[in-house]
Amino acid sequence: MAFVEKTLPADAPIAAKALNWVDSRFPLTKLWNDQWGNYYAPKNFNFWYIFGSLAMLVLVIQIVTGIFLVMHYKPDANLAFYSVEYIMRDVSWGWLVRYMHSTGASAFFIIIYLHMTRALMYGSYRKPRELIWLFGVAIFLCLMGEAFFGYLLPWGQMSYWGAQVIVNLFGAIPLIGPDLSLWIRGDYVVSDATLNRFFSFHVIAIPLVLLGLVMAHLIALHEVGSNNPDGIEVKDNLGPDGHPLDSIPSHPYYSVHDIFGVSVFLTIFSAVVFFAPEMGGYFLEFNNFLPADSLKTPPHIAPVWYFTPYYSVLRATTSQFMYALIAGVLGYVGLIYLKSQLAAKIKAAIAVVGLVAIAGMLVLDAKFWGVVLMGVSVMILAAMPWLDKSEVKSIRYRPSWHKYVYIVFGLAFLTLGYLGILPPTAGRTFVAQICTFIYFGFFVLMPWWSKMGTFKPVPSRVTFHPH
């Protein structure tokens, strides 16, 4: 195909000529129009749909601040802590860049948790958006890995001992556990080799994977279209121009919508950075302002707040809890046999898996099953599109009592997060065990409770009240 460059009038603005020159060689305007400018989104978006854009903003903040931090950080066990102190005290505006990065980490997880809450409420993981959800879960896993690897880098007391505890958990895996822990650490204890490994993963490996997943997430979203609070497929009602009748161009309508949300977020973000960057020890723990000491263990070791729900699941898995877990597996297999419409062969296979799991619970240590449940508590999110059997997507048209199921699940998750921050006691462990059952029960019982009750009629068009 011959090269063709669009001809513009001689008096055309220089900016227009420059853009035309680029468009002739690279589809810049086409990309903008396809991904945002002429991308039609449902017109009934509410404030819950702001968190996707905010996540992109925080990702940019983390990358930019991370680049500046790496300029002065020393990935050396003897120098790491003092290089962070140098950044905070001697580098011009270094304290601001470091606090933006540490606050951005917590802000990232707050936004992602709210983004996932919206998906749960409005069924954004349902057909045809299963792949979008799977990419999102993969992004969440990458963020957890990125946060974990980055948490060691300040080389403070909590960084060091937190990494020691988490890496040692892999030692509970039968046969390969000790060797796997050794391979992750690169030494027999958390040391300079561990710091260098974690640094390379935090700065290079995971960010590259994360950026690829974010691109895949956005491409998949724009291929099938955005969901909306009504859970209605707007592409089912097209206008004469081929665009959905209940959609509007993202630009300028949702550009303004997002700019307002970004302004509110940056106001809150700035207030935290300038006035409370430690957030009472939740964003930056007090022990992390002490250099790592392998001979002095902190009285209470806990991960950062965004990991504590899953850490609580780990701590709740005691030897006594295993008996309740065995009873739960037996009850669940019985429920599948009595209430499921699955084929007999599949039911038999599930029964065999259940019996093998029970045998493993009787033989293997509770610590191992704690690690398994901690991992499953995150991975089970990927099964949501196939666990939810509701005849509607949005919570607006589900039975009213479904809202209370979501509320109980949310309260159990928040309780697990709070308990994970506190030192364990017998009472707190018991509450964590109850919340763990609620957490997993929400998912494994979803094929049944999600289709129970009287559903409200879903309108054929989205409901929208201009304001």
Image (cartoon, grey):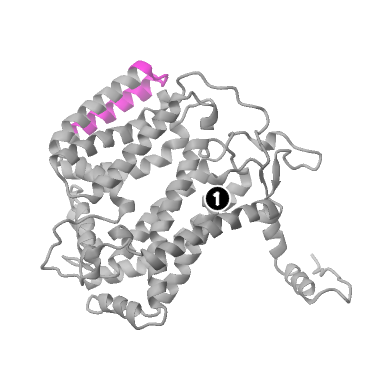
Residue 65 shown left or right of residue 79 in the figure: right
> Secondary structure under badge 1?
helix
The x and y percentages for residue 118 are 49, 42
Q: Residue at left 40%, top 53%?
A: 109
Question: Residue at the top extreme?
Answer: 338
Depth check: 313 or 179 in front?
A: 313
| Badge 1: residue crowd in 10 Å (few <14, some 14–19, many ≥20) | many
Which stretch appears magenta?
A: 338-359
The x and y percentages for residue 305 are 31, 53
Depth check: 28 or 123 in front?
A: 123
- As drawn, 4 above or below 137: below
Residue 302 shown left or right of residue 14 in the figure: left
- As drawn, 99 above or below 237: below
- Number of numbered labels in the structure image: 1
Residue 276 shown left or right of residue 459 in the figure: left
Q: Amino acid at mark 1?
A: Ile
- As drawn, 284 above or below 257: below
Specify the quadrant of the image occupied by residue 153.
Answer: bottom left
Secondary structure mostly seen in the magenta stretch: helix
Residue 125 is one of the magenta-drawn residues: no
Depth check: 363 or 163 in front?
A: 163
Specify the quadrant of the image occupied by residue 3.
Answer: bottom right
Residue corresponding to mark 1? 50
On the question of residue 314 being in view, the answer is: yes
- As drawn, 310 above or below 297: above
Q: Residue at left 22%, top 78%?
A: 78
Residue 342 is one of the magenta-drawn residues: yes
Quarter placement of the C terminus: top right
The x and y percentages for residue 51 are 51, 51
Quarter placement of the N terminus: bottom right
